[in-house]
Image (tube, helix red, strand yellow):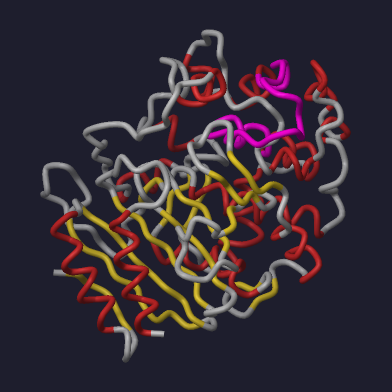
Amino acid sequence: MSEGFVAPGFERVRDAFEQQLEDELGAGFAAIRDGEIVVNLWGGWANREQTRPWAEDTIVPVYSTTKGVSALVMALLVDRGVLDYDAPTASIWPAFGAHGKDKVTLAQTLAHQAGVPGFLNPIDPDLWLDPPACAEAIAALAPMWPPGSASGYHPMTWGYIVGEIARRAADRSLGTILREDICAPLGIDFQIGTPESDHARVAEMRKPSRGGDFGEITPPRKAAFFTKWAAPVRGSTQWRSIEIPSTNGHGTALGVARLYEAYATGGLINGVRVLSQEAFDALAKRRWLGDDLVLPFRIDWRTGAIGNSNSFYGPNPEALGHSGMGGSAGFGDPVAGVSVGYVMNRQSHHIMGNPRSFKLIDALYSCL
């Protein structure tokens, strides 16, 4: 059975969630409409042995759903005038300009066009656990395609790049800005860089039985996903505690829904303006629409978030969101006025777009 709340008229979402729990280990689903919580449900188990029930305050790593949150922080820095989407990334981080990356703009970098989706040559995987050193190594890479000429998803490297840019621009880490300027003031349970005091409430992940189908393993795909050093070992105390703005955000479904509310409202979260309309419009601006060199489909890249051209985020093409490895998702839909957070700990093999989340999203829209 699930726990939590559904507003009158949204009972179908609870029904769908309880049916869905048969296919989950544990999960949470939340939706906000016009600033009001209409769904906040959780249930199942927070550990693989099924001895710890999923609680209201259970948090879970959402992997690349973190990117849409980090994009909000970068937009906040643009709004404050300390960053410029149209300026070269190398203007704030000169080392990043190595090997012809000197002209790639911040907007292009956020839209996965910089050409450095991973390390093709061997590295020590522990390098990922040292963000300053990892950022330095990424800056030194030669691009795998002419920067700005195509997009190729940067699953890990994106976070180290934006983290370094934020630190240089604001003299605070991206996770600190998120905590101090957004989450703490607004009471949002989401963190990039999770202190050890919160690790006891983190759900354990169950990996999928097989990987996703990427098609031909080209060099960009190999660098991004298919080497022994493509990512750190996840789940350690150190991995949870450091900041990886591309992949290690931890939060509740409601925390995800609250942050992605900004994408449904043009920059408002719970009635508080976090971004100016001008800054939000720049965040939401399309930067690339076409076949991605890493992901095996066309992507509508905005300035760090994904447009809904593949219908991952409900029926309205105006929605903006991001998905995470294994199936988590967050999005905001300005047409319906809703934002959604879905988190779980039994991971799916689907690359983006988890059929389990689709059923819940369909149930939600049937109630609107």
Q: Is residue 93 above or below residue 354?
A: above
Q: Is residue 51 visible?
A: yes
Nearer-the-camera pick, 270 or 360? 360
Q: Residue at x 34, y 86 (%)?
A: 7
Nearer-the-camera pick, 120 or 44? 120
Coordinates of residue 105 in the picture (x, y in percent): 82, 39
Write down the region rendered in magenta. Answer: 138-162
Res 141 quadrant in image = top right
Residue lying farthest to the bottom in this orientation: 8
Answer with left or right where residue 28 lies relative to residue 311. Answer: left
Q: Is residue 83 visible?
A: no
Q: Residue at x 36, y 53 (%)?
A: 59
Nearer-the-camera pick, 48 or 71? 71
- Quadrant where the image shows the N terminus: bottom left
Q: Is 111 contained in the magenta span?
A: no
- Quadrant where the image shows the C terminus: bottom left
Coordinates of residue 102 in the picture (x, y in percent): 85, 26
Answer with left or right where residue 167 lies relative to residue 103. Answer: left
Q: Main secondary structure of the magenta part?
A: loop
Res 57 quadrant in image = bottom left
Answer with left or right where residue 52 lies relative to residue 208. Answer: left
Coordinates of residue 220 in the picture (x, y in percent): 56, 23
Coordinates of residue 247 in the picture (x, y in percent): 49, 40
Q: Residue at x 48, y 83 (%)?
A: 36
Q: Is 154 contained in the magenta span?
A: yes
Answer with left or right where residue 7 lies relative to residue 174. Answer: left
Q: Residue at x 78, y 41 (%)?
A: 106
